[in-house]
Amino acid sequence: MSASGTGVGVGASGTGVGVSASSTDEGTALPAVTDTAVSLLIADDDEVTRSGLGMLLAAQPGITVVGEAADGVEAVERARSLRPDVVLMDVRMPRLNGIEATRRLLAEAADPPKVVVITTFENDGYVTAALSAGASGFVLKRLPVRRIAEAVRVVAVGEAVLFPAALGRMVAARPLGSAEALPQADLTGREEEVLRLMATGLSNPEIAESLTVSLETVKTHVGNVLTKLGAQNRTHAVVIAYESGLMVPGITG
């Protein structure tokens, strides 16, 4: 992020975090989570952005910013000591980038925090790598702060944050070599259908409603999909869906 020199600015709405989101994805609805108390650690190498995000997000209902980190090494250390529910992780940081910091956090902690990657650039290959390392989702910095807060709350309760159009373009631009995982997984027809719906950004309850099945049935299918694909989480599974060609950027059906 230091390369971009982008800080945080309050837009005309009074809630903007000054960086970019695709117009295709800006209106994407996230699962409604409003009553969850979340402790948050913000990791970003730019002090202005880090402190600005901290102030804006601390003003959002239910979110407590428990600390900040200026690089990946500090992010891992502070997450160990502070035990936040969620880490908002910049991917481009000195000493240790957000990809490796995410990998270490999720591998070393007994009860690791959820990680949301935050990035300036929509086609940032670091983001897809971080998602494959286990991050639960990503946000683009031009999103209004209320949307970033929604993303933090959503991952805190175990859902994923996906902006399908942007994710599809990222994967198409910088594939990570997981295209063979899907054909080798031998998914059932229903499991493939569930994966397609996951890739459109639907939550488990929304998938259950779409397929007219119980929430428990959906959870079972999602668990089977993750296991068969060898995916870290549902976001990683969606990356595999795009890389394999099951999902095509701009085509959700």
Image (cartoon, grey):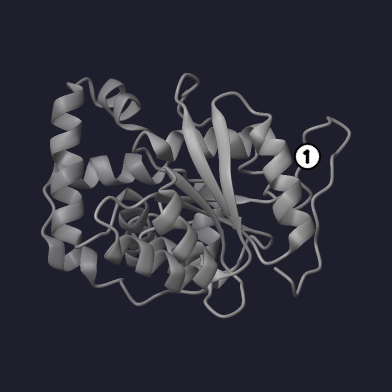
Q: Is residue 59 above or below residue 45?
A: above
The answer to whether residue 110 shows anywhere in this view is yes
If the image is split into quadrants, where does the N terminus sit? bottom right
Instruction: Examine the rendering and report whether any part of residue 144 can be seen.
Output: no
Please name the residue shown 37% across and 68% down the image: 103
Which quarter of the image is occupied by the C terminus? Answer: top left
Residue type (three-letter) at the residue carrying disc 1: Gly
| Residue 146 place in picture, x, y as percent | 66, 31
**Residue placed most toward the observer, 176 or 127:** 127
Q: Picture quarter containing residue 217?
A: top left
- Indicate left or right for 153 with 55 as reference: left
145 to the left or right of 245: right
> Which of the two residues, 54 or 34, is positioned nearer the viewer here?
54
Task: Decide: is 159 above or below 22.
Answer: above
Q: Is residue 66 left or right of residue 19?
A: left
Q: Position of residue 72 (x, y in %)?
A: 53, 70
Q: Residue furthest toward the bottom?
A: 95
Q: Position of residue 221 (x, y in %)?
A: 15, 40
Q: Residue at x 75, y 55 (%)?
A: 49
Q: Decide: is 109 above or below 184.
A: above
**Callout 1: 10 Å neighbours few (<14), some, many (20+)?**
many
Identified at 73% across, 50% down, the residue is 51
Q: Which residue is mark 1?
A: 16
Where disc 1 sits, the SS reads: loop
Residue lying farthest front? 81
Left or right of residue 87: residue 193: left
Q: How many marks?
A: 1
Give the x, y percent position of residue 135.
41, 56
